[in-house]
Image: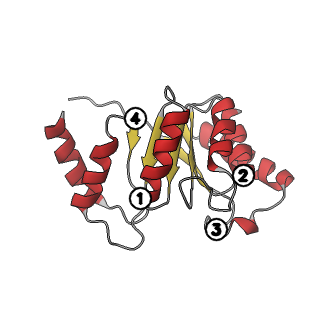
Amino acid sequence: PEQEITIAGSIAPLEDCYSPELAPDDETLITEHTIHAEMLAEAGADLLLVETQNSRREAVIATQAALSTGLPVWTALMPCSATEMFNGDSLIETAREIVEMKADALLLNCCTPRIAAQAFAILRQEFPDKRLGVYPNNLEGSVSPELFTDWALQLIDKAQIIGGCCGIGPEHIKVLTERMASHS
């Protein structure tokens, strides 16, 4: 059967996502993210995924750059707890600003499944009608495909987008896909 394919162009922080203090000044962020977003749009991306955003400042600037292309934009924030961005900014305040900017989806990524679930619950309560998603990591290697799938199935009726970040591999996605098929 013919399948519709969507190509996402990724816009990550300009510096290491685990070192938000290295982010350059606003002018540099605006210039670099705008150039990158325009290049992805010109290359034929169907949507822009502003991901692994570790601070409110860069998340807002990168999202604005992506939105300026006219393409759909999904913005993924990187929490370090249920309430804080990786750099300590308020997760909910950052999320509110991204939602007000009219990003098409708001996601969480590059955090543990536990933090992702806790932060997701807060976002779902705050934004009951917003398209939300989550794709946690498995950097410690302690999340088996079965545990990942059990976790994901708890969110299946609340999240519109579910996936995996670093350390969530094809074996995790395979088990999730198989269990989702039998879940529906």
Between disc 2 and disc 1, whose residue precedes? 2
Between disc 4 and disc 1, whose residue precedes? 1
Q: Secondary structure at mark 3?
A: loop
- Classed neighbour count for the residue bearing mark 2: other residues with Cα under 10 Å, few (<14), some (14–19), many (≥20): many
Location of mark 2 (residue): 58
Q: Secondary structure at mark 1?
A: helix
Location of mark 1 (residue): 114
Between disc 3 and disc 2, whose residue precedes? 3
Label ID, residue 124: none
Query: Disc 2 residue type?
Result: Glu
Residue occupying image coordinates x 51% and y 29%: 130
Residue 43 percent across, percent down from the top left: 58, 41
CA–CA distance between discs 3 and 2?
12 Å
CA–CA distance between discs 2 and 4?
25 Å
Location of mark 3 (residue): 16
Q: Quadrant of residue 143?
A: bottom left
Q: Quadrant of residue 4?
A: top left
Q: Is residue 125 visible?
A: yes
Location of mark 4 (residue): 160
Residue 109 percent across, percent down from the top left: 49, 53
CA–CA distance between discs 4 and 1?
18 Å
Give the mark count: 4
CA–CA distance between discs 4 and 3?
28 Å
Query: Disc 4 residue type?
Result: Gln
Residue 174 percent across, percent down from the top left: 22, 53
Query: Disc 3 residue type?
Result: Asp
Between disc 2 and disc 4, whose residue precedes? 2
Residue occupying image coordinates x 82% and y 55%: 28
